[in-house]
Image: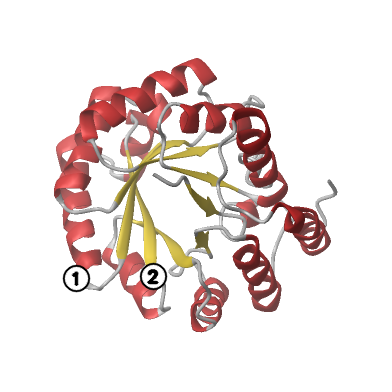
């Protein structure tokens, strides 16, 4: 099975301190990502602002080869905004750690999160969206609950399931263990989303793919909030040249894309 590449430069990458992209800049980056050959472009969070909504709509209207995705919470308004902007899919996350559940749904519990997630997935599918459902802050959560949450997502007919290392605390070894367990328990396509707080985002992403992950999330130049995300160019090149796993990107287009993102974000590589 082909390993899918979800690029989140236009969503997680734009959360880099000091970075704010115009609609025109986002469109140029999206076109370059499409030419590179990424499978999914997470173009923003449609509900977050008028700018994000316009960017997702402009990119969706281009009818690129890549699937155009909007980030979403397990909230109806997020789903409606994504669908109204013309997105093909949503990457919808639910809090899975006690930290996030208590912060986002105070006074509620794990059963409430599962119920809200199922309702949101079912509604998103009614709106015609492909659903990638993720457990947010999963690396600090009880793994048994993460599995139960993702299984509920699978049963609600989410097409893809994601384990999010939201604060970048995974190690490569633990990543391999978790992906192996998820593959065994869930038997559906599994994606990995890693942050670079301890400098391990690329290594963790590579180990996830080596352990059976069907999709990975990354950003151009590894930009993103706090210490950044897994670097798209690093993961792609490590997988192909060190492990013989071709993810289907046009390698000669990586450098021009890197420089384009550097120019627009002013984050020097």
In the structure shown, which secondary structural element does the residue marked by tag 1 occupy? helix
Name the spot of residue 91 as percent of width and height, x first.
39, 55
Q: Quadrant of the N terminus?
A: top left
Name the spot of residue 201 as percent of width and height, x first.
60, 32
Residue lying at the far top of the rendered structure? 173
Q: Name which of mark 2 and mark 1 comes first in the sequence.
A: 2
In the image, residue 2 above or below residue 43: above
Left or right: residue 93 compared with residue 112: right
Camera-near label (2 vs 1) is 2
Instruction: Identify residue for label 1.
Output: 126
In the structure shown, which secondary structural element does the residue marked by tag 2 occupy? loop
Residue occupying the point 67% across, 56% down: 250
- How far apart are labels 2 and 1 at the CA level? 13 Å
In the image, residue 183 above or below residue 113: above
Q: What colour scheme governs how the chains and residues are painted in the rendered image of this protein?
A: secondary structure
Residue occupying the point 61% across, 39% down: 230
Question: In the figure, residue 69 lies in which quadrant?
Answer: bottom left
Q: Is residue 260 visible?
A: yes
Left or right: residue 111 compared with residue 189: left
Question: In the figure, residue 14 lies in which quadrant?
Answer: bottom right
Residue occupying the point 60% across, 66% down: 34
Residue occupying the point 43% across, 78% down: 85
The numbered mark at residue 88 is: 2
**Disc 2 to disc 1: CB gap under 8 Å:** no
Question: In the depicted view, which residue is nearer to us: 139 or 77?
Answer: 139
Name the spot of residue 126 as percent of width and height, x first.
19, 70
Name the spot of residue 115 as percent of width and height, x first.
15, 47
């Amino acid at each position: 099975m082909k390993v899918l590449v979800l690029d989140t430069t236009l969503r997680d990458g734009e959360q880099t301190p000091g970075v704010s992209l115009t609609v025109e800049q986002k469109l140029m980056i999206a076109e370059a990502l499409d030419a590179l050959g990424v499978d999914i472009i997470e173009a923003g969070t449609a509900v977050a602002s008028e700018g994000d909504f316009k960017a997702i709509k402009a990119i969706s209207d281009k009818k690129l080869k890549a699937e155009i995705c909007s980030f979403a919470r397990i909230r109806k308004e997020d789903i409606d905004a994504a669908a109204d902007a013309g997105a093909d899919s949503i990457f919808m996350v639910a809090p899975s750690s006690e930290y996030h559940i208590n912060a986002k749904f105070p006074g509620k519990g794990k059963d409430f999160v599962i119920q809200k997630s199922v309702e949101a997935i079912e509604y998103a599918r009614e709106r015609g969206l492909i659903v990638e459902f993720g457990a947010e802050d999963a690396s600090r959560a009880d793994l048994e609950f993460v599995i139960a949450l993702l299984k509920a997502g699978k049963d609600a007919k989410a097409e893809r399931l994601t384990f999010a290392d939201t604060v970048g605390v995974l190690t490569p070894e633990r990543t391999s263990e978790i992906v192996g367990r998820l593959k065994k328990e869930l038997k559906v396509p599994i994606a990995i989303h890693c942050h670079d707080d301890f400098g391990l985002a690329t290594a963790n992403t590579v180990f996830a793919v080596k352990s059976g992950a069907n999709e990975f999330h990354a950003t151009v130049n590894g930009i993103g909030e706090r210490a950044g995300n897994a670097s798209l160019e690093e993961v792609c090149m490590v997988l192909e040249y060190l492990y013989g796993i071709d993810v289907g990107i046009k390698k000669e287009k990586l450098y021009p894309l890197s420089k384009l993102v550097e120019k627009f974000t002013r984050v020097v590589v």
